[in-house]
Amino acid sequence: MKLLLATKNQKKLAEMRRILEPLGVEVLSEAQLETPLPEVEETGTTFLENARLKAQSACQATGMAAVADDSGLCVDALNGAPGVYSARYAGGHGDDKANNDKLLKELEGLPMEKRTARFVCSICCVFPDGDEITAMGECHGHIGFAPEGDGGFGYDPLFLTEKGCFGRLSPAEKDAVSHRGAALRQFAEALKARLDK
């Protein structure tokens, strides 16, 4: 089966391929299409709403089953911010350094026990027949005082778990505990059930 991943983020693509390809699912990227996917404004108030907007748009544009995720960081001391605005927390979209710098500034002076946070990932897959599969995963941890490691992306260098900082984990170690890994495993089970029908 072929699934189109509605993202321009190559690191998300790599993560999704690592988890779905063993199921016999070929994950296609926008780069493999003849025309780029339409830009989608992420106007949802939840991660799932944004994932659905992106998957629906890609499915309508291509006639292919399309999967999208929306994920972000929810920090308890900031009432759940940056939340759905994680990628554009500091203003520009996807400026990891600026986002991390802003987060550290917002948490300045807070002790570790008050720096609790969770990564959330919602996945939505929309099929040409109108069916959809959704999945969600979370990973709980703390926000560190300074970036660590050069692995991962986004807030990974600041996110500390029992297994260590996301910025220092190998891809396989991160997949085993991450929000996206959990959501993708849940999604993979639902997809397998659909394929086995």
Image: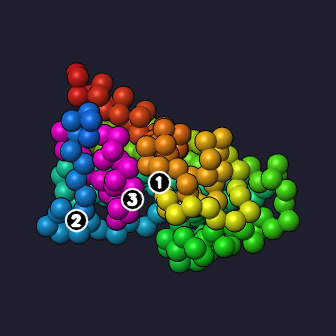
Q: CA distance from mark 2 to mark 1?
A: 19 Å
Q: Residues within 10 Å of mark 3 (few under 14, many from 20)?
A: few
In the displayed structure image, the side of residue 86 where residue 39 appears, left or right = left
Quickly name the residue at label 1: 70
Q: CA distance from mark 3 to mark 1?
A: 14 Å
134 to 43, vertically: above or below: above
Residue at disc 3, secondary structure? helix
Residue at disc 1, secondary structure? strand
- Residue 84, x across and y down, in percent: 57, 59
131 to 107, vertically: above or below: above
In the displayed structure image, the side of residue 26 where residue 106 appears, left or right = right
Q: Identify the residue at image location x=18%, y=69%.
A: 35
Label 2 amino acid?
Ala
For marks 3 and 1, the one nearer the N-term is 3
In the displayed structure image, the side of residue 118 where residue 169 appears, left or right = left
116 to 10, vertically: above or below: above
Q: Identify the residue at image location x=62%, y=61%.
A: 148
Quickly name the residue at label 2: 31
Mark 2 touches mark 3? (CB < 8 Å): no
Quickly name the residue at label 3: 11
Q: Which residues are magenta?
A: 1-20
Q: Which mark is residue 171?
A: none
Looking at the rendering, in which quadrant would you find the C terminus?
top left
